[in-house]
Amino acid sequence: MNTPVQKNDQLTVYIEDLTHDGAGVAKVDGYPLFIAGGLPHETVEVHVLKTLKNYGFAKLKNIVEPSPFRVEAPCPVFYECGGCQLQHMTYEGQLAWKESMVRNVMKRIGKIDAPVLPVKGMDKPWEYRNKSQIPFDLENGQVIAGFYQAKSHRIADTNTCLIQSDEADRLLRAVKENALKLDLVPYNEETKKGQLRHLVVRKGRATGEVMVVLVTKHAKLAKQEEIIQFIREVEPNVKSIVHNVNNQNTNVIFGNETNVIWGKAVIEDLIGDVRFEISARSFYQVNPVQTEVLYKQALDYAQLTGEETVIDAYCGIGTISLFLAQKAKQVLGVEIVPQAIEDAKRNAELNGFTNTYFEAGPAEEVIPNWYKEGKHADVLVVDPPRKGCDEALLTTIIEQRPKRVVYVSCNPATLARDLRILEDGGYKTKEVQPVDMFPQSTHVECCALLELV
């Protein structure tokens, strides 16, 4: 294979950019080398590990000229754990890179010339996660817990995580230390033996309420009352203790059976003035501070006067819908997951909203039916999963022609792709506002405004 570099070459290269998973990118005669731990704007010495036809991988050996944004990563397992990718970069540098990345993706993938605004970041970009999902394992007779190493299912053992809540850290340490005494022998994916698979901790930031979920292989907890008492002593703010059973040979965290073994079935939180009930398996944004920033941006782009009908596709448990309902005449939400729709209805009732309507089903089927019934959207909001909008939904939007589309996205690449389709269908992207929902990682959320031409 004829490439500009060969395996085992020792090179000095200049890093130009980062990949989506945080590896540095250097080019040798146009040939990309991916270098874990490298940062943009630094010259480094590397050892080439592997070469493929179009790109290769190299190991960072020495930093000749460091990036002006390089810092010492504060987490002791940063280089093993796959949870964060950018702790070795100043927060200022992270925001600058994310803005540049969004701008480049818009131009390269979407051919979009709308302005990309500076990223809205956090004052304190640590301890922001309100949900932690912590796997357990047994290694040489010792309980280990933490988070998976990058691209593997090996656990980077730790006692603390700098981006999760104090409550989650406290419970991680306590359960790890006492798991064997409580007959919660960690489950091993290879041998299929053991009991405790995951500890899930959820926290309502505004209310302080905590939910603890134990995910185990078996339906019976041998020392259930002891476990309940133990958790309550470790975490005084716990309001809900839940047992989820996952007896399948799978990487999916939750199983189908969920039982509340102490306290309430839900905890509550507020985003702005809107109250939400969160169950063990509810989808709820993990960074409540930035969620409010993001949703206020969506509300701002919607430009509501109180006379509009808004459709919220991919509405989930109604988080964006209820934010919009504060200023809209009517909000119609659609979501393919029936349980999420039930949660949305309950959250609307909890807040006293009478101008919302939620329906379960595929958005690309439900929305045309609404139009046939005379329910036309002045504003349409989408917040799809990482894969972006279903093609049929984009066709539906173009056919139904709402005046404004507000697109909330967790993946700039699929956002750019979908904006191109909407622009070709008669819309104009006015502005893209990135919001840093996941500091210390390469992920960035965006909110885009489109208007009908």
Image (spheres, rainbow, N blue to C red):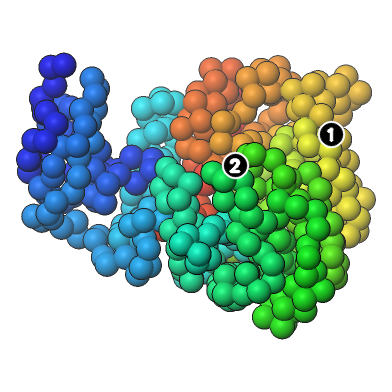
Residue toward you, 62 or 107:
62
Q: Nearer the viewer, residue 185 or 29?
A: 185
* Structural distance between the alpha carbons of marks 1 and 2: 27 Å
Label 1: which secondary element:
strand
Quarter of the image with the C terminus is top right
Which of the image's four quarters has the N terminus?
top left
Image position, residue 203 (x, y; %): 68, 67
**Residue 440: x, y in percent?**
41, 58
- Give the left or right position of residue 207, taking residue 159 as reference: right
Q: Position of 183 compared to 107: left or right?
A: right
Q: x and y percent of residue 76 in the render? A: 36, 68
- Label count reads 2
Mark 2 surroundings: few (<14), some (14-19) or many (≥20) residues within 10 A: few
Up/down of 238 relative to 35, above or below: below
Q: Earlier in the sequence, mark 1 or mark 2?
A: 2
Q: Residues within 10 Å of mark 1 (few under 14, many from 20)?
A: some
Nearest the viewer among 237 and 322 is 237
The residue at 88%/41% (across/down) is: 357
> In the rendered image, which quarter is residue 134 located in?
bottom right
Residues at badges 1 and 2 in contact (C-beta under 8 Å)?
Answer: no
Please name the residue that numbered disc 2 is placed on.
251
Q: What amino acid is found at the position of numbered circle 2 in the picture?
A: Asn
Residue 360: mark: 1
- Note whether residue 46 is visible: yes
